[in-house]
Image: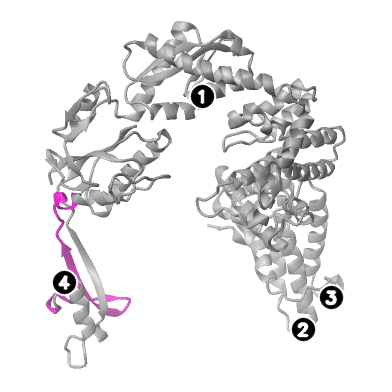
Amino acid sequence: MSKRDLLLEIGLEELPARFVTASMNQLSEKVQKWLTEKAIEFGTVTAFSTPRRLAILVKDVEESQKDIEEEAKGPAKKIALDSEGNWSKAALGFVKGHGMTAEDIYFKELKGVEYAHVNKFIQGKQTVQLLSELQDIISGMTFPKNMRWADQELRFVRPIKWLIALFGHDVVPFSIADVKTGRVTKGHRFLGNNATIENPSQYEAALAEQFVMAAPDKRRQVILDQIKTLEQEKGWIIPVDEELLEEVNNLVEYPTALFGQFEEEFLELPAEVLITSMKEHQRYFPVKGEEGKLLPFFVTVRNGDAKHLDKVSKGNEKVLRARLSDAAFFYKEDQKKDIADALKKLDSIVYHEEIGTLAEKTARVKTVAGILADALNLSEEKVMALRAAEIAKFDLVSHMVYEFPELQGYMGEKYALLKGERKEVAAAINEHYMPRHADDDVPPSVIGAIVSLAEKIDTLASFFAIGVIPTGSQDPYALRRQASGVVQILAEKKWNISLEELIALGLKGLEAKNILKRDVEEVKADMFTFFKARIKHLLQEKQIRYDLIDAVLFGEIGSIHSIVERARVLDAKKDEAGFKESMEALSRVMNIAVKCENKVTVDPNAFDNDQEKALYEKYQQAAMKYTNSKSENERFELLVSLQSEIEAYFENTMVMAEDEALRYNRLSLMKEISEWVASFAAMNKIILS
């Protein structure tokens, strides 16, 4: 079969940078899925994107679908033929459904029964006949935000300006929003011209002649190389933030890096202020010296060539100077205010109309922080944790955070130090927002971790209390991130704080203030399920097998650190000799224990064989050591130490005895051991090969 290359390009008004990569990948995945579903073989796939285009080049696409020859099974012979040997309605319906006749039927025996069969042949269609369906792929793309334009009904991320659909040299004809497919693409908006693509393989080179680097990976590398050159020429260190690099890469089609400078007096501002001003508002990379301190320079990337860079640099300097002047003014003004005055303003700031003000939230967080500090037997650190919880939100009313919300916490630490707060308290103000994102660390200090935990559990409890629970992709208050933060902190700090108790603690203050709009037990159940999903995700990231995760998450959670350690122990032991046999023994106990409907106190005097006595005594000894053990590995070994006694017990003991008292006693022993085993993990959930 002959092959051709396929090119599909969607030309658009400039896309938001944050949408570009995901949209490119979506187009690539949809086209590949379509080709696979249509049984059209193809070779390598290359995706392209710039702010003005999304494109995909598929090499070696077959010119027709594969022919399909398959055997179809129909009704049994006794149903396909009537008593006189004529074809039944079932048989005739079977062949009609496959576009064949009764003459095509043959019988084939399967497991002692003959069934009607037909050989079905479907000739593949020409690929060119199917390619117009690419129109539906484009129209069916989804984006975080859509728009409509002119009188078009189509909702798309940005107005479509041109379309290319080429199969080899031929244009695939279709139109979307009155834009017809062709072979003409547009070059750089200011430097380039239109380019005619005669063959898909020419696409990338043709755009390069018109000052467009269509491959995002290559464009990214050009930016990095140019930054590296500046570092070498100037003796600078230019930290490259990956998120910023991704955004900049999706803002340009022909990148040229350049630098500018600003007045040294601005270096008196906190480094976070300077970096945020450059990064968040201007998309500039900061510049540091060899000792790691910020220098009065910045690096930016122009969407164009190297002509007149001095003018471009001056323009960028002027814009940044205005930003930094504002920041300097805010910084000075904020220092004129006392923390107490800032805290008073929290009384008038509504956190959520159903939950209350920021001041009310702060009071609840302070209460929870104090209880957590007591649970950890802290004294001096408790005093600092209470103070940190009390003033953790005071920077939210500052000019600086109002202008740069990204600086919440950072500015709280700076301003607290300037106002004479203890450094541990100031650091905790910043740390209580941690982890800020999936790759962030937990608060390094105990004080910061306590306030962070208190803050997050109050946030979660508050929203669950009023029925605001994330569903699907909807999570406007970032509750999943908050819950993941709680899980990370408890796991990494190794605190023996029960998740169930923490949830109850978060809800207690809400009940007292009548914020709880739902049944408290229902809220607890929802929060428990929500946290369970976050713990499961944490364990999955640690490469723990799914059945082992199900085993440790079967019952109550208790200590999250303990859950993680138990999962690690099971994961480490699962391939060791004897693991299967030990799990089978423990699982046998757990499986029969479910038949215990009336648990009674186990009476050792009622045992009637030595194996019962031996199991009970071994269990009693192991359970006592289990309670005093601090190692999950030791606890696991104590559980499996019962294996031989359990095996001997079942070989010599009829648990479901006819005598009711004897049966209850035996089932109650099984139940007691089962509950003890389940406190580690539900061993009967583990898949044994």
Q: Provide the secondary structure element on which disc 1 rests.
A: helix
Task: Give residue 270's position: percent from left, percent from top.
Answer: 64, 19
Q: Mark 3 sits on what residue?
A: 606
Does 111 lie within the magenta span? yes
Residue that carries the numbered disc 4 in the rendered image: 99
Q: Cβ–Cβ below 8 Å for labels 1 and 3?
A: no
| Neighbour tally class for label 4: few under 14, some 14-19, many 20 plus, Cα within 10 Å | few
Q: Earlier in the sequence, mark 4 or mark 3?
A: 4
Q: Earlier in the sequence, mark 2 or mark 1?
A: 1
* Rendered position, 615 above or below 402: below
Amino acid type of the residue that numbered disc 1 sits on in the rendered structure? Lys
Of badges 2 and 1, nearer the viewer stands: 1
**Amino acid at the residue labelled 4:** Gly
Residue shown at 38%/45% (left/top)? 146
Observer-side mark, 4 or 3, equals 4
* Mark seen at residue 190: none
- Give the percent coordinates (x, y) of residue 437: 58, 37
Q: Which residues are magenta?
A: 102-131
